[in-house]
Image (cartoon, rainbow, N blue to C red):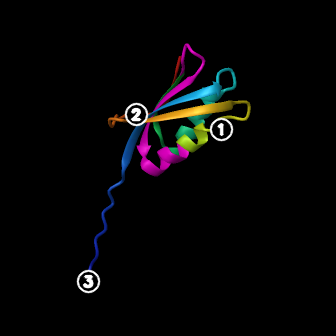
Amino acid sequence: MKRYFYSSKILMKTVHILIKGKVQGVFFRASAKEMADKLNVKGWVKNTATGDVEVMASGEENNIYQFIEWCKYGPRRAFVTEVIVRQNEAVSFNDFSVRR
């Protein structure tokens, strides 16, 4: 009997995301944490002094892609005008946290 072995290598990815628009005061950070936890994405989210939201996210490539797609709309009250995504060197996080 022939046996086949398939690589179970999972592509991990780390990205830095900057979200612009009406993204503060609309529960963007809390909603981002909920989505990240749902997608098993690790990292952090924080507000910037310039009114944007900044994210560092690490996880399986497909989950990161889904998280980035969510960032393009955010929570119900957000109005996202631009999402800038940059590849980052791989970083390992234990969880997804909201930074103040």
Gap in angstroms between the C-alphas marked 3 and 1:
48 Å
Work out whether mark 1 precedes mark 2 in sequence or the reverse, and give the earlier one.
1
For disc 3, the marked residue is 2
The residue sitting at 56% across, 34% down in the picture is 83
Give the secondary structure at mark 2.
Answer: loop
For disc 2, the marked residue is 94
Residue density around tag 1, few if under 14, some if 14–19, many if 20 or more, within 10 Å: some
Work out whether mark 2 precedes mark 3 in sequence or the reverse, and give the earlier one.
3
For disc 1, the marked residue is 73
Question: 40 or 45: which is nearer to us?
Answer: 45
Vertical arrangement, residue 65 with respect to residue 33, above or below: below
Give the secondary structure at mark 3.
Answer: loop
Find residue 52 and report its horizontal and vertical position in percent: 58, 22
The residue sitting at 65% across, 32% down in the picture is 80
Residue density around tag 2, few if under 14, some if 14–19, many if 20 or more, within 10 Å: few
The residue sitting at 26% across, 83% down in the picture is 2
- The kind of residue tagged 2 is Asn
Question: 9 or 16: which is nearer to us?
Answer: 16
Q: Are marks 2 and 3 in contact (CB under 8 Å)?
A: no
Magenta span of residues: 47-67
The residue sitting at 64% across, 31% down in the picture is 81
- The kind of residue tagged 1 is Tyr
Give the secondary structure at mark 1.
Answer: loop
Dot in front, 3 or 1: 1
Residue 34 among magenta residues: no
Q: Quick one: which residue is furthest to the bottom in this view? A: 1
Find residue 61 and report its horizontal and vertical position in percent: 43, 49
Residue density around tag 3, few if under 14, some if 14–19, many if 20 or more, within 10 Å: few
Gap in angstroms between the C-alphas marked 1 and 2:
26 Å
